[in-house]
Amino acid sequence: MSNSAVVTTGPIRGSHKNYRRVDGMDVPTRRVELSNGEHLDLYDTSGPYTETDPGIDLDRGLAPVRDTWERPAPVDGAATQLAWARAGIVTPEMRFIAAREGVEPELVRSEVARGRAVIPANHRHPECEPMIIGKAFAVKVNANIGNSAVTSSVAEEVEKMVWATRWGADTIMDLSTGDDIHLTREWIMRNSPVPVGTVPIYQALEKCKGDPTTLTWEMYRDTVIEQAEQGVDYMTVHAGVLLRYVPLTARRVTGIVSRGGSIMAAWCLAHHEESFLYTHFDELCEIFRRYDITFSLGDGLRPGSIADANDEAQFAELRTLGELTTIAKSHGVQVMIEGPGHVPMHKIVENVRLEEELCEEAPFYTLGPLATDIAPAYDHITSAIGAAMIAQAGTAMLCYVTPKEHLGLPNRDDVKVGVITYKIAAHAADLAKEHPRAQERDDALSRARFEFRWNDQFNLSLDPDTAVEYHDETLPAEPAKTAHFCSMCGPKFCSMRISADVRQFAEDHNLRTQADIDAMLNAEMDRKSAEFVASGKQVYLDITPAVSTHQG
Amino acid sequence: MSNSAVVTTGPIRGSHKNYRRVDGMDVPTRRVELSNGEHLDLYDTSGPYTETDPGIDLDRGLAPVRDTWERPAPVDGAATQLAWARAGIVTPEMRFIAAREGVEPELVRSEVARGRAVIPANHRHPECEPMIIGKAFAVKVNANIGNSAVTSSVAEEVEKMVWATRWGADTIMDLSTGDDIHLTREWIMRNSPVPVGTVPIYQALEKCKGDPTTLTWEMYRDTVIEQAEQGVDYMTVHAGVLLRYVPLTARRVTGIVSRGGSIMAAWCLAHHEESFLYTHFDELCEIFRRYDITFSLGDGLRPGSIADANDEAQFAELRTLGELTTIAKSHGVQVMIEGPGHVPMHKIVENVRLEEELCEEAPFYTLGPLATDIAPAYDHITSAIGAAMIAQAGTAMLCYVTPKEHLGLPNRDDVKVGVITYKIAAHAADLAKEHPRAQERDDALSRARFEFRWNDQFNLSLDPDTAVEYHDETLPAEPAKTAHFCSMCGPKFCSMRISADVRQFAEDHNLRTQADIDAMLNAEMDRKSAEFVASGKQVYLDITPAVSTHQG
């Protein structure tokens, strides 16, 4: 692998990279230029890959942008964003994030200081463009990738990372297994513009040939240090799976579905000992503090079916995660908490409420949850429903689910569908939380739609390529993209066109309040309506209509 | 068109039609036989087409099953389900529905009598298998179909109806336009096992060459009668778009997006007169009563963008729909109310609350709503999020949205994706409302998943064909469908397998309460854990692992 041809580069359709210079740092946005002369700058996670001529060299890796930023001195021995925030220090990472999110740096600092937000940024991952996970900020999306010894090369894994971030993944988790696990991760770290997470127990399990009962604390610790040195920004640690909780899962419909959870359950039962992740948690905190790695405290006992949601096993583990949160923060280490899984809609909010209560409002990071079990092959959708709702309730980051969940390995298309679906859920939650800038994009797109600026509508969408493709299936000709009608109603009759006429009518006659309307209705309507008929005739061209699939 | 080759027939993978004889009526279910000797009967909307050898003859149409049922005498001149329900009469349709839903006939009668549920069943549609729309029952899904003069034949429209109901559509709306509109509808009516809805104003508009300003009440009335005679079960009527509401839409981001709404708005403005649908509403009720057609009072001023949600225009119309509901019911006519549209999540519940308050709890029938505007090409998903939430809040029927919404005409695949997506939303809501039998299917599927009964998992899913296809992409060999592992973790390590071992361990040692667990932990664990190690070794076969894409 010695050239950049293996990864996708270049701008997304209808946009270009736009860096803003803020305090000596280049803060990226993706700018969509509109046909009416306006533009909209969008949050952008895609790194240099979407520049017009990025000059990517995967061997060399991305430029280590954070190396040039001034790092504050440690506070009480801790060189972590949490320690600095508590000491009142606004770091370059916080300023970068504030510019990216469109908020004040002080909000970033104070949320990190309270532990309600985290900035996963290992000192050894200088290529990373910092981002924040917390409920006061835009909801984030994680995409899982990971090599298969059989099906993919190291280069393909790097491309999966580039591909996932191109469509909006805010972080990626490398869940690789197999012989090339260290090398694969090295390539990903050096080329990733977003924070990278891992589950160290997976690699540790490789080291003992897949038998969890032979795992040791030392093997695990060494694996964590190996990954820490490479620059991993956050790590999932299933330290809440305690010996006494394991039998609580026995009568579940689907037992333990987390890999990490079942590894630790098997270890605890085999040894009749408390989990080494729990008994050595302080030591783990010391390692994490050295690099400023963020804990992602794993939910090893999360429910794997609707029947098991919100049960005693799940909430027992959550209480332990709360204890561990307090310990980690006492070391100056940042923490987020992982959440379920499979949960019916009426039990979702309870998960967020309990997590906030038990875990000092540490950011919640959930997988879905899937709102029903009955739709394998569509679990991106079953889980997007749960994800949107749990994010509305306060979850800070959503781990995507692809259409292949429960069935097989996601391919390139599945990764894209998973990311886009989760961007929808995250954005829907941003709207519902009335995030200050969220609705800008909806409004810009809807105005474009109403004004028949088809290309603007496509370019403002989450997936311009697919929007164009679908449009062109019915009306492929280029003029159709500027036509004042669409394929649903056709040129003969178009409801959006009629309502544009209504608007023109109202504006022409200065109808701004209900009083204006009533006055006109009582006095002037006859004349106005005649004008409307006269001016409106041009709407109804006598061309063969297409069919409507709109309701009503 | 003179043979049945044009429509899809035969059972859905892994199931077969099973009629139960109830009070002399054949009530259909779809039976899934499981490999463990159990079976599950599923609600089935697909009609005779999914019988093993259905002998379909589209020229002749389906057997008019309802013709053999005894129809009660009119009550005060009204031969409607509402009139009978109010008079305490349980009709054959109500008994059929009760058997289908697994509830008491008296619940069906009382909900219809209160106007909280409707049974759309035109006397002239005897081929229909009756179904109920109301919040005390399973949430229903409508699929829109409609011919295009350019792209589809009459036979293709019938196939779309068969295809949509095969995947679970509870009703279909025929939104056809063009020259063959009457003939197309006749074919659909005679061959549809589900209630059929229409929007008569579309056909009326055809009769005046697409110019809404030349519409008249007489043209509209005659169209309604024409469709009523054919057997249309429910009709969308935009009688709430009043003259004085039209200018309220002028300052919206997306004006009026309902076709019916914009037709009536154009008519009102051009004539400076109140809508003829409103002024002639009593006459319309008399026609509807004669056939027992159900009103679907259209939301002509529904929001077409997030910005316009819950605005004055929308709620002004809703108030008028409330008045019309009272009038319709005074004629003994059944009513449901159509709802938005595009609504951010935090404004969804308000829609249901207001609808119930203003419209005497008439069943709510919503289009989505889309929870964000920014994802054309994925609007089945943006709207499934809103649909699941609004159904949880009490909406009785959801109108599907396909991936082509806003962009083009749905093809066969889009129709299927739209229906499946909406079955997910409807079922998620049934779970959240704790509908008595909803979770049976989730539990059966999850048990199959946990026990590695792969074919049972596929066959219990909403779309067995796609589930199998995705599975086979990674592990195509037939033995993989009975393997005790899946492609995500591979044979070497499998979390579900480990937790199966945990369960076995607990059951072997009679761990049923926390006290049992504590006792064992304190006393017996060493011996048990040794047993676990001995018995557990067989789990970890030394075979090349595949990759996990599970989180944690």
Image (cartoon, coloured by chain):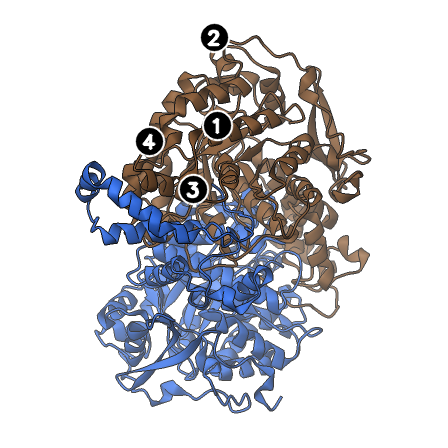
Chain colours: A brown, B blue
Q: Secondary structure at mark 1?
A: helix
Mark 4 or 2, nearer chain start: 2
Q: Please state which amino acid type lies under the numbered disc 1.
A: Arg
Nearest to viewer (mark 1 / mark 2): 1
Q: Is B65 located above or below residue A9 in the figure?
A: below
| Residue where numbered disc 3 is placed | A212
Measure the C-alpha gap from mark 1 to mark 3.
15 Å
Q: Tell me if B163 is positioned left or right of B104 in this view.
A: right
Res B83 seen here: yes
Within 10 Å of the Cα at label 2, are there few (<14), some (14-19), or many (20+) other Cα atoms?
few
Measure the C-alpha gap from mark 1 to mark 2.
24 Å
Location of residue B402 by image quarter: bottom right
Q: Please state which amino acid type lies under the numbered disc 3.
A: Pro
Q: Secondary structure at mark 4?
A: helix
Nearest to viewer (mark 3 / mark 4): 3
Q: Chain of mark 3?
A: A
Nearest to viewer (mark 3 / mark 2): 3
Q: Residue at x 25, y 43 (%)?
A: B527
Mark 1 or 2, nearer chain start: 2
| Residue where numbered disc 4 is placed | A320
Residue A523 x/y as whole percent: 57, 48
**Same subunit: marks 3 and 4:** yes
Q: Chain of mark 4?
A: A
Mark 3 or 4, nearer chain start: 3
Mark 1 or 3, nearer chain start: 3
| Residue where numbered disc 2 is placed | A76
The answer to whether marks 3 and 2 mark residues whose Cβ atoms lie closer than 8 Å is no
Q: Secondary structure at mark 2?
A: loop
Q: Is B539 located above or below residue B218 in the figure?
A: above
